[in-house]
Image (tube, rainbow, N blue to C red):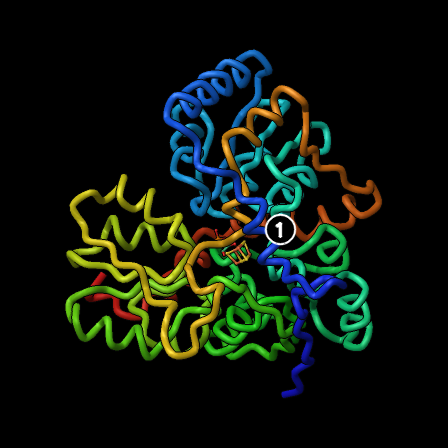
Amino acid sequence: MTTELFDYPLQDATGTTCIAQAWAKVPPTLHKDQKNQIIQAIKSELVRQNAVLVAHYYVDGDIQDLAWETGGFVADSLEMARFGKNHPAQKLIVAGVKFMGESAKILSPEKTVLMPDLDATCSLDLGCPADDFTKFCDAHPDREVVVYANTSAAVKARADWMVTSSCALAIVHHLKEQGKKILWAPDRHLGRYIQDQTGADMLLWEGHCIVHDEFKAIELETLKAKHPNAMILVHPESPSHVVDLADVVGSTSAMIKAVVEGTAQEYIVATDKGILHRMRQLAPGKTLIEAPTAGNSATCKSCAHCPWMAMNGLQGILNCLTEQSGEIIINEDVRLKAKICIEKMLDFTVNNPELLAKAQHGFVKNIGAA
Ligand code: 13P
Ligand code: SF4
């Protein structure tokens, strides 16, 4: 199989890494009184403006709690898109990364969608510029174009399907059954995992998530030896050697479900550590252990926390409400094109619950332990 190589350097013209720039924008820790003041102000503005807060599992625990307390929602990227579309509020505050705010706007153009920091992006999105991606698609017109949600609106506008980690396996399996050949972008690890599981003919873009790419199989084996009864939960954006060690491979919500429903006492978690907040709330008696990112090949990025997710702060949310800052604006032509592949995914997930459940089951490699 031919594999197109495209690895975005994640640097700007000055040689500064995007990651360093993102960490530099992470809001400072707030003093307790200051934090409470901001939380109260957000609560009253959300009510006054009939707005709702939607957050991803990777953002700060205070933001997740605030979303739940104010009638909002904390979820994976598929459920966030669904919630934003179906909620009656005309103003959505999206705490997550840019593609999540864009998906909300693409699906609900009549709503105002605001984000705490519009620079909160994703290495997969950065690593798949629309122009290069268009050339890649043009070179392979015989393939069905399937893109991961972690892409720009312009990339989605060129795709036939959008998928998230919750439904990627079911949708690619469905396309394979129809005899389709797939062009996949941008996450190479997720693409390879789906290829292995479905046997589909997939041409992969070589993008990666800087957070999940750092999990280390050798160190994970050492940790597992110290905790032989622990279940290993892995997000499929992780390298294949790490995925090979997993008991459960799945989206953020599948990983949470595994902790809540699992009979094991200990869980080793290979994804952004922001997820531990929700896991602790839903399964307070369980022991959660962060999967190792450090080791001989560790880099300065090895902290299992997404610098772009970390850019979401309480002050940023308040600014959305008081200054209407961080508004997502999408070119209407791009939006209309991008909407087709997102709605196709949403329709598929609603109409094929049994296929989704079956594919999700395929993610669970060691059901006995779950
Ligand atoms: P989920 O779709 O599983 O929430 O993942 C989104 C993401 O960005 C993972 O890094
Ligand atoms: Fe993107 Fe990785 Fe951050 Fe998820 S954790 S938003 S895939 S950089």
Residue at (45% x, 33% y) in the render: 73
Residue 63 in picture, x, y percent from top left: 44, 33
- Judged from this view, the residue extending furthest toward the bottom is 1
Mark 1 Cα shell of 10 Å, populated few (<14), some (14-19), many (≥20): many
Quadrant holding the C terminus? bottom left
Disc 1 residue lies near ligand 2 with CB under 8 A:
yes
The secondary element bearing badge 1 is classed as: loop
The reply to whether residue 85 is visible in this rendering is yes
Q: Amino acid at mark 1?
A: Thr
Percent position of residue 124, x then y: 61, 61
Front residue (pair 359, 280) = 280
Residue for badge 1: 121
Q: Quadrant of the N terminus?
A: bottom right
For image coordinates 40% across by 28% down, the residue present is 31
Q: Is residue 180 visible?
A: no
Q: Where's residue 326, x and y in %?
A: 67, 34
